[in-house]
Image: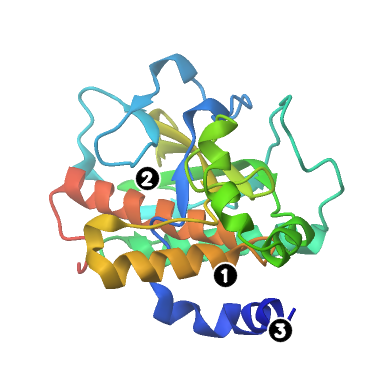
Amino acid sequence: MFLVATLLTGCVGDKPGLGDGTNITVSDTARMTKSGFLSEYGRLKATQWGEGMQCWSEQNLKASRYNKVLVSRIVVSFASSTDRRNETMIDPNDLKTLTDYFHEALVKSLKPQMQIVDKAGPGVVVMRVALTDLVPTQVTDSIAGTLIPYAFILEAGSGTATGRPAGSTPYMGETGMEMQFRDGVTGAVLAECRDTEIGRKYAADMNSGVVGAAQTWASGYLNSFQQWSYAKNAFDKWSVLIAQRMAEMRGVSAAKK
């Protein structure tokens, strides 16, 4: 019990020293949503840059025409699913906290390369975002698993055994999003994306060396003791990936204007 208490109290404050969370969540194509928020789900395909994210864009899109971005208010549009482990009601305060966090993460990632505006117009790309699935981590189950000696050996392999990503467990949180990009003048749809990320309690990035792998493992484990940590990890991940892709398409640096 002392170990659990230590993890719970140290989880938030120690996070910056445990890596950026990039590999703590992983895309799950089996759980991609189709909420009706996007216009053309049939055109969505896996991308080389999105780490599992599916997208499409207009063939003749001239992204360099857009130097401003309007990040619309993020909405929640739950998709129907046979595997929704969040039948309990979600606190409206949690929803606001999560949507505000995601909005701020997008703005922070995009601001170095594009002007953030609050009105549509010439040179503006309007980003519309919907959270289409939100499943909190079942913290009680995570703690119970931790108290069982050597339980991690079975849990670490339970993801693949149940058709989930490796390192996840049945009680991990998951987060789905659908994102649309529109022209700020005509309203024409320029591109769309979607993804569903699942938390990994037992995550490791072997490509980052021993220290990086240990940091990712520790971050994934610690975040399993908070309801919404994996959702925030996913928001950070999407924000960075989208900003990098937009910079690439516009032919500018994602780090500075």
Residue 50, x across and y down, in percent: 32, 41
- Within 10 angstroms of label 3, few (less than 14), some, or many (20 or more) residues? few
Where disc 1 sits, the SS reads helix
Residue 253, x across and y down, in percent: 16, 60
The quadrant where residue 210 appears: bottom left
Mark 3 vs mark 2: give the one in front.
3
Q: Residue at x 26, y 46 (%)?
A: 245
Q: In this view of the protein, which residue sits in the foreground, 197 or 58?
A: 197
User: Which residue does the numbered mark 3 point to in the structure image?
Assistant: 2
Q: Residue furthest top?
A: 42
User: Do tag 1 and tag 2 residues touch (Cβ < 8 Å)?
Assistant: no
- Within 10 angstroms of label 2, few (less than 14), some, or many (20 or more) residues? many
Q: Residue furthest right?
A: 88
User: Which residue does the numbered mark 1 point to in the structure image?
Assistant: 222
Residue 20 in view (yes/no): no
Q: Quadrant of the C terminus?
A: bottom left
In the image, 120: left or right of 129? left
The quadrant where residue 227 appears: bottom right
User: Which residue does the numbered mark 2 point to in the structure image?
Assistant: 125
